[in-house]
């Protein structure tokens, strides 16, 4: 018989599949790699389910696993490959980025730390405290990286170059 913790974990993983895919895709920009990253993160989550101490922190715990999985894949790849939307197979998962990819491209052009904070804050609607827990960074570090990233985005969208 499954424990309450395992039932909660199973419910969370099944219910959040699309959200997990969106987050992985925002990092990897490749449909297949994003699906692989989610699958790997789910496997790691299930293997390490005993390390989850606080069931209330399930969301941040799993998000940290998923973000780390995506970062591992990016490090292995050592380069980012942008695939035009028309080259993607039509499948059950749609491109989660807006049709005008200018903003998404600019977010992807941010330094990795700022990119992570912006994606978790605005793509996943996480609070700054949750982002701090997911990344392991101090709350003030999260705030400064978010505001620096937003400033760079605003400047780049206005067409002004940073000095």
Image: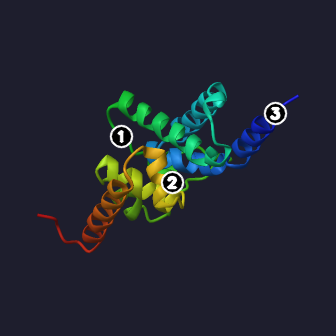
Residue 56: x, y in percent?
A: 65, 49
24 versus 50 height, above or below:
below
**Outermost right residue:** 1
Which residue: 23% across, 72% down? 159
Which residue: 40% across, 50% down? 116
Q: Which residue is mark 1?
A: 80
Secondary structure type for disc 1: loop
The quarter of the picture where residue 145 lies is bottom left
Counting residues from the N terminus, which is met first, the one under dot 1 or under dot 3?
Answer: 3
Counting residues from the N terminus, which is met first, the one under dot 2 or under dot 3?
Answer: 3
Secondary structure type for disc 3: loop
Q: CA distance from mark 1 to mark 2?
A: 27 Å
Near-viewer residue (65 or 161):
65
Secondary structure type for disc 2: helix
> Where the N terminus falls, by quadrant?
top right
Give left or right: position of 2 versus 91: right
Numbered circle sitting on residue 142: none
Q: Judge depth for marks 1 and 2 and give the one in front.
A: 2
Q: CA distance from mark 1 to mark 3?
A: 41 Å
Counting residues from the N terminus, which is met first, the one under dot 1 or under dot 2?
Answer: 1
81 versus 154 height, above or below:
above
Q: Residues within 10 Å of mark 1 (few under 14, many from 20)?
A: few
Q: Which residue is mark 3?
A: 3
> Where the C terminus falls, by quadrant?
bottom left
- Specify whether residue 156 is in view: yes
Which residue: 36% across, 53% down? 115
Which residue: 48% across, 62% down? 122
Residue 97: x, y in percent?
A: 50, 58
- Specify whether residue 97 is in view: no
Q: Which residue is mark 2?
A: 130
Q: CA distance from mark 2 to mark 3?
A: 26 Å
Give left or right: position of 161 versus 89: left
């Amino acid at each position: 018989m499954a424990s309450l913790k395992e039932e909660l974990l199973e419910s969370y993983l099944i219910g959040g599949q699309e959200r997990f895919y969106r987050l992985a895709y925002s990092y990897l920009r490749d449909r297949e790699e994003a699906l692989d990253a989610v699958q790997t993160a789910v496997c790691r989550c299930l293997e390490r389910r005993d390390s989850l101490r606080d069931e209330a922190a399930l969301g941040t715990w799993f998000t940290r696993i998923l973000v780390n999985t995506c970062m591992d894949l990016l490090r292995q790849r050592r380069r980012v490959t942008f695939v035009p939307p028309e080259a993607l197979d039509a499948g059950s998962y749609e491109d989660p980025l807006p049709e005008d990819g200018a903003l998404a491209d600019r977010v992807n052009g941010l330094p990795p730390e700022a990119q992570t904070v912006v994606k978790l804050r605005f793509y996943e609607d996480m609070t700054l405290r949750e982002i701090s827990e997911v990344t392991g960074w101090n709350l003030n570090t999260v705030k400064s990286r978010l505001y620096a990233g937003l400033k760079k985005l605003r400047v780049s969208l206005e067409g002004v170059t940073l000095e």
